[in-house]
Amino acid sequence: MLAVFGHTNPDTDAITSALVYARLLSRQGVEARAYRLGDLNFETPFVLREAGVEAPEMLPELGAGARVALVDHNESAQSVSNLSELTVTRVVDHHKLGDLTTSQPASLRFEPVGCTATILLKLHREAGLSVERTDARLMLSAILSDTLHFRSPTTTPDDREAVAFLAPIAEVADVEAYALAMFAAKSDLGDTPADTLLRMDYKVFPFGDPAKPQTVQQWGLGVVETTNPGYVLGRQEELLAAMDRARAEDGLNGVLLSVVDILRETNQTLVLSATEEKVLREAFGVEPEGKLADLGSRISRKKQIVPTLEAYFTPGA
């Protein structure tokens, strides 16, 4: 049995892509099963209920050599802890190539699109397989989530075409209304603990020159996408304390948490200490005010935050 899973702290794309890809492989004669590496965020249960699908189980402990397929990630820091001991046979991803190595040739599909689900639709078409309603609903939801309904700069014409193709199959007559319902579910944060808020969409990235290990720094980058940023920013002190704990627990050089207003397309980033303040000032050219830095319309971690930090920590690369 091939285990298919997305990254830790999974978002809607990581969960739905695991489900859709496992089903696609099974239809092609490869026995596969979807799993998850962490708790669901607030948007994903809404998506799964709308599609009539149960959440995948947590990935059990896998022994050395177990065959796995990765979706929506390829970096070891964002995957299962013993990834180096497993046999990665397939990867479908829309992020940059990280530190992935394989013990044998693997099937790799990377494309610079806004969502893994966009690539999965292409794989259906290339295999000559129809898209069923449930899978269409899952892929449609993932694309709307990852692209913030085409607001994100990561959006491509392929993503737009995929949504137009999938919506009728998914029986979603009003895509905008459905996207807003998804975002409302994502923003219904209630009394969620600050540590959970921080880690709902949180990834650790290495920055620096790998050829010079002494220059490499580990940074935690969290994002809260919401239609109600005032609620999140009103818990600033709790979140800063959670960021401080994460920095110590994960052995990081710095932690940033971006509060993205989905509808206004703005980014307010919490500033933990003088270390983060210096990096934000020098890398992004912004002047933090107190514990907040206005990053303007930089709402994509993948396309606007990570590349800027990579250029800052590896000048001339």
Image (cartoon, rainbow, N blue to C red):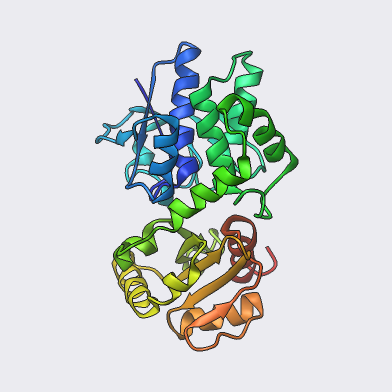
Residue drawn where x is 41% and y is 36% of the image: 48
Percent of width and height locating residue 245: 30, 72
The C terminus lies in quadrant: bottom right
Residue closer to the observer: 79 or 13: 13
189 over 171 or under it: above or below? below
Q: Residue furthest right?
A: 157
Q: Quadrant of residue 296?
A: bottom right
Residue 193 is situated, as x and y percent measured from the top left of the image, at: 29, 65
Q: Residue furthest bottom?
A: 290
Q: Quadrant of residue 122?
A: top right
Residue drawn at point x = 47 percent, y = 73 percent = 230
For the point 67% across and 33% down, the residue is 162
Residue 296 can be seen, yes or no: yes
Can you tell which quarter of the image residue 93 is in? top right
**For residue 301, above or below residue 254:** above
Tell me where residue 256 appears, x and y as whole percent. 47, 70
The quadrant in which the N terminus is found is top left
Q: Position of residue 206 (x, y in %)?
A: 49, 60
Q: Please tell me how many numbered marks the rendered image carries.
A: 0
Residue drawn at (37%, 77%) of the image: 240
Figure check: 225 above or below 315: above
155 left or right, relative to 280: right
Asked if one can make out residue 70 in the rendered structure from this viewpoint, the answer is no
Q: Is residue 270 above or below residue 199?
A: below
Camera-side residue of 19 and 1: 19
Please state which of residues 17 and 172 is positioned toward the viewer in this rendering.
Answer: 172
